Image (cartoon, rainbow, N blue to C red):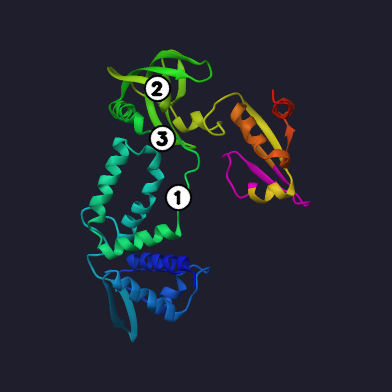
């Protein structure tokens, strides 16, 4: 039996027992396990014994002639936090998602909270977390590191919380120049391995997105601001494929059979509409900003994709591919 099955099954058992105040019979525990996990009474009994050995206080009692398993009263929730043991362990496991923010106050606060929460869980139970980490891992992919930007992130967080404008020197990658900006900071947003500030730029007279690592200096002012009543940060970025904004265009792509096999299983953009063709190819329609991000994304599929429309995008992809081939 794969070790992953054992850990996953025990995790599901704990989740079911946490939710059942009256406990569950062996048949009920078996019925509530996912269909893709082995379901045998003897195996479940071994799992329950393993959880007891990990200091999870399981109690058995006979009700109406049937043995029921439940967690001891008081253990189901950690009073100080209102979190169940598996919820605490899930937080401990997911802390890896904030690895790029290592060195910042945000990550330090999460680590501190996790240490306090973990103290409420018996050591053998925390060993269960380590076993989970051997079964599931978090792959962050390409990402930026923000250890050297701790002061900037902390200051921006304070500015957003207090509703105060910031003054900053910002390096624009597109213009290769550093300019002074006065910005009303609306939100910090982590996207595709990078941390960005979304806010109203008084210089540009518009809402803009700023890469945190390109903020050369930042100062908190005493000038209060209010987000417009019709302000919607999510709407501001909805057209971007990742972070770049631009003119909205209607795009139609055609993926060959081999490429379609893994394209259709992902949400690349909220607006995407997929149509599976009889010959195995996949048609994708989406409304997205016309940017170099879009161009690079399409090229990443190589000859597995064809641009159906618009003609301007088709021409841009052709010119870019030719420039790459010719080493221009």
Q: Quadrant of residue 181?
A: top left
- Element on which disc 3 rests: loop
Q: Secondary structure at mark 2?
A: strand
Can I make out residue 198 in this image?
no
Q: Which residues are magenta?
A: 263-283
Residue 135 point in image, percent of width and height? 45, 60
For the point 28% across and 40% down, the residue is: 108
Quadrant of the snapshot with the C terminus? top right
**Separation of disc 1 and disc 2 at Cα?**
28 Å
Image position, residue 115 (x, y; %): 25, 51
For label 3, the residue is 145
How many numbered marks does the figure carry?
A: 3
Residue 202 is left or right of residue 18, and the answer is: right
Sequence order check: which comes first, mark 1 or mark 3? Answer: 1
Say which residue label 2 marks.
215
Q: Earlier in the sequence, mark 3 or mark 2?
A: 3
* Identity of the residue drawn at 47% across and 44% down: 140
Label 2 near label 1: C-beta < 8 Å? no
Viewer-nearest of discs 3 and 2:
3
111 or 206, which is in the foreground?
111
Of callouts 1 and 2, the N-terminal one: 1
Is 56 rendered above or below residue 92? below
Residue 32 appears in the figure? yes
C-alpha gap between disc 1 and disc 3: 16 Å
Q: Are marks 1 and 3 in contact (CB under 8 Å)?
A: no
Residues packed near mark 1 inside 10 Å, few (<14), some (14 to 19) or many (20 plus)? few
Can residue 254 be found in the magenta stretch?
no
Identify which residue, 136 or 305, lies in the foreground: 136
Q: Position of residue 245 (x, y in %)?
A: 55, 26
The residue beneath circle 1 is 138
């Amino acid at each position: 039996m794969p070790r992953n099955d054992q850990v996953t099954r025990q995790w599901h058992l704990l989740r079911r027992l946490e939710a059942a105040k009256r406990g569950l019979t062996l048949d009920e525990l078996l019925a509530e396990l996912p269909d893709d996990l082995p379901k045998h009474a003897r195996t479940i009994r071994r799992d329950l014994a393993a959880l007891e050995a990990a200091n999870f206080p399981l109690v058995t009692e006979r009700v109406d002639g049937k043995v029921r398993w439940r967690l001891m009263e008081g253990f189901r929730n950690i009073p100080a936090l209102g979190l169940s043991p598996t919820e605490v362990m899930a937080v401990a496991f997911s802390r890896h998602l904030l690895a790029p923010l290592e060195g910042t106050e945000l990550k330090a606060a999460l680590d501190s909270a996790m240490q306090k929460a973990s103290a409420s869980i018996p050591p053998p139970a925390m060993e269960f977390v380590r076993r989970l980490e051997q079964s599931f891992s978090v792959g962050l992919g390409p990402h930026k590191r923000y250890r050297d930007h701790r002061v900037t992130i902390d200051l921006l967080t304070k500015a957003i919380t207090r509703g105060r404008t910031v003054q900053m020197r910002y390096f624009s990658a597109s213009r290769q120049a550093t300019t002074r900006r006065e910005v009303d900071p609306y939100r910090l947003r982590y996207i595709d391995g990078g941390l960005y500030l979304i806010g109203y730029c008084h210089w540009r007279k518009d809402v803009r997105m700023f890469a945190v690592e390109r903020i050369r200096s930042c100062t908190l002012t005493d000038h209060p601001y209010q987000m417009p009543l019709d302000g919607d940060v999510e709407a501001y970025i909805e057209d971007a494929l990742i972070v770049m904004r631009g003119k909205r265009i209607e795009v139609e792509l055609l993926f060959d059979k081999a490429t379609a096999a893994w394209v259709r299983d992902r949400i690349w953009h909220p607006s995407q509409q997929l149509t599976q063709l009889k010959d195995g190819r996949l048609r994708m329609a989406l409304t997205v900003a016309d940017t170099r991000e879009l161009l690079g994304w399409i090229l990443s599929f190589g000859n597995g994709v064809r641009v159906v429309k618009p003609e301007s995008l088709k021409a841009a992809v052709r010119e870019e591919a030719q420039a790459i081939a010719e080493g221009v």
